[in-house]
Image: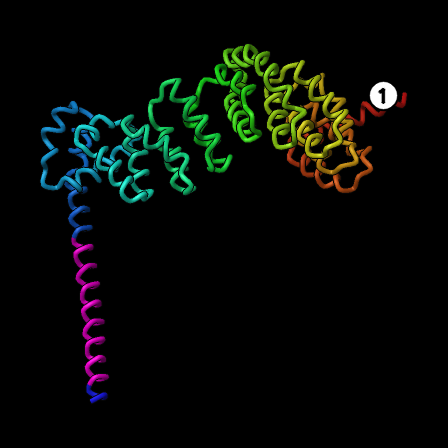
């Protein structure tokens, strides 16, 4: 009797396994069929569909496709075109009902794929949801929500609301900086907000954003030079107090002030170098001095290139290497006087990249001969 029961159980388990295997095979077959249908639909429709997305108004487009029998495929095709082109088609998505569907799907599942869809759709209808999800304890969801909200056309009030929410979120600083860069709020209006920050996290994010905005202004174009000169006074006013904050704040503050190339910023940096023993602070200051004119910083960089700390010396040499002929000439001079073996290879690397090395050597020899006389 017992053996019959065991035998029956074996057959039941075997039958269940066979059923599961057949189910998986059939499921994969249907999946492959769906994928092929979608691929065929894309290939046959994409070009015409893209033309209609670009040229039909939202009402006409909705009338044509809202009740289409292949509506799910239409949505995927719209997402693909919007993603490839980078255009804002949110009115089409809104009227077709796709925006609401993505929002509801996310609320029901919390799956990030729907946040990715919303980042492509770019609809203002998703603003409240995305702002709330920036505070999500799920880091991937929070970042995706932040990235999606950065693609919306935000009002100045919304920009500030998003910025404050990002600062208080659990998203890592580097990703918050990326999101703020995408939002790109006006720098002049956000400099005073730097004074209002009560956390180092907020200060670091804003300083990195400011640095990213003013770096491209360092140019030979007079318009950009003038724009940076106008901003410099305000930047120095709001950023200089942060030089004396803890290192994570002080370092980006140094980079911002260095980026201005302003003579007052230079005095602040040289004074900090003189009185602050922190190696990272000193090295970062040396690294930023190439932004200033050579006649203002050449002697200081020569002294820094003889500092007892290797990283300070390295930063000084890197600055000199970016300062044209005068900087290369100074490196050549230092190569004969430096008593730190660890910098010899660095000097060789810098000088060997220079096409006019022989000319520098000849000029240096002449200077030495003139000094001897």
Specify the principal SS of the magenta part: helix
Q: Position of residue 264 (x, y in %)?
A: 67, 14
- Above or below: residue 43 compared with residue 194: below
Q: Is residue 88 magenta?
A: no
Which residue is located at x 54 percent, y 13 percent? 231
Disc 1: which residue: 370
- Quadrant where the C terminus lies? top right
* Residue 211 higher or lower than 137, as above or below: above
Q: Position of residue 148 (x, y in %)?
A: 35, 32
Is 7 located above or below residue 211 in the figure?
below
What segment carries the magenta color?
5-33
Furthest-front residue in this view: 1
Q: Quadrant of residue 54?
A: top left
Q: State left or right for residue 85 relative to residue 51.
A: right
* Residue 350, x across and y down, in percent: 67, 35
Q: Residues within 10 Å of mark 1 (few under 14, many from 20)?
A: few
Q: On the rendered structure, is 131 left or right of 320?
A: left
Residue at 16% in and 54% down: 33
Task: Pick the residue in front: 185 or 227.
Answer: 185
Residue 211 versus residue 132: which sits nearer the camera? 132
* Residue 218 placement: quadrant: top right
Quick check: 80 left or right of 206?
Answer: left
Horizontally, is 174 left or right of 9 in the view? right
Position of the N terminus, as image quadrant, is: bottom left
Total marks shown come to: 1
The residue drawn where x is 89% and y is 23% is 372
Does 29 appear in magenta?
yes
* Image spot of residue 142 (x, y percent): 40, 38
Residue at image x 19%, y 87%? 4
């Amino acid at each position: 009797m017992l053996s019959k029961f065991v035998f029956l159980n074996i057959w039941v388990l075997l039958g269940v396994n066979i059923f599961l295997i057949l189910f998986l095979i059939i499921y994969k077959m249907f999946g492959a069929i769906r994928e092929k249908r979608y691929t065929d639909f894309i290939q046959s429709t994409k070009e015409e569909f893209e033309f209609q997305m670009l040229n039909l108004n939202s009402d006409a487009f909705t009338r044509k496709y809202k009740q289409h029998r292949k509506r799910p495929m239409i949505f995927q095709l719209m997402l693909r075109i919007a993603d490839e082109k980078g255009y804002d088609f949110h009115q089409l998505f809104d009227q077709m009902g796709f925006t609401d569907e993505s929002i509801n799907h996310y609320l029901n599942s919390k799956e990030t794929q729907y946040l990715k869809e919303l980042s492509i759709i770019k609809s203002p209808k998703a603003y409240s949801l995305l702002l709330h999800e920036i505070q999500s304890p799920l880091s991937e969801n929070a970042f995706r929500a932040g990235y999606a909200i950065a693609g919306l056309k935000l009002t100045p009030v919304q920009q500030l609301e998003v910025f404050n929410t990002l600062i208080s979120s659990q998203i890592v600083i580097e990703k918050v900086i990326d999101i703020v860069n995408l939002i790109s709020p006006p720098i002049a209006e956000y400099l005073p907000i730097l004074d209002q920050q009560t956390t180092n996290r907020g200060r670091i994010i804003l300083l990195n954003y400011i640095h990213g905005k003013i770096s491209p202004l360092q140019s030979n174009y007079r318009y950009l030079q003038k724009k940076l000169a106008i901003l410099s006074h305000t930047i120095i006013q709001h950023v200089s107090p942060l030089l004396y904050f803890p290192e994570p704040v002080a370092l980006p503050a140094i980079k911002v002030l260095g980026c201005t190339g302003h003579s007052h910023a230079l005095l602040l940096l040289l004074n900090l170098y003189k009185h602050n023993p922190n190696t990272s602070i000193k090295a970062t200051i040396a690294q930023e001095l190439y932004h200033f004119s050579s006649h203002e910083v050449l002697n200081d960089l020569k002294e820094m290139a003889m500092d007892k700390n290797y990283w300070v010396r390295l930063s000084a040499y890197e600055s000199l290497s970016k300062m044209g002929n005068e900087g290369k000439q100074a490196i050549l001079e230092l190569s004969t006087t430096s008593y730190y073996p660890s910098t010899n290879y660095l000097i060789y690397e810098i000088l060997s990249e220079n096409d006019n090395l022989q000319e520098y050597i000849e000029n240096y020899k002449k200077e030495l001969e003139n000094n001897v006389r």
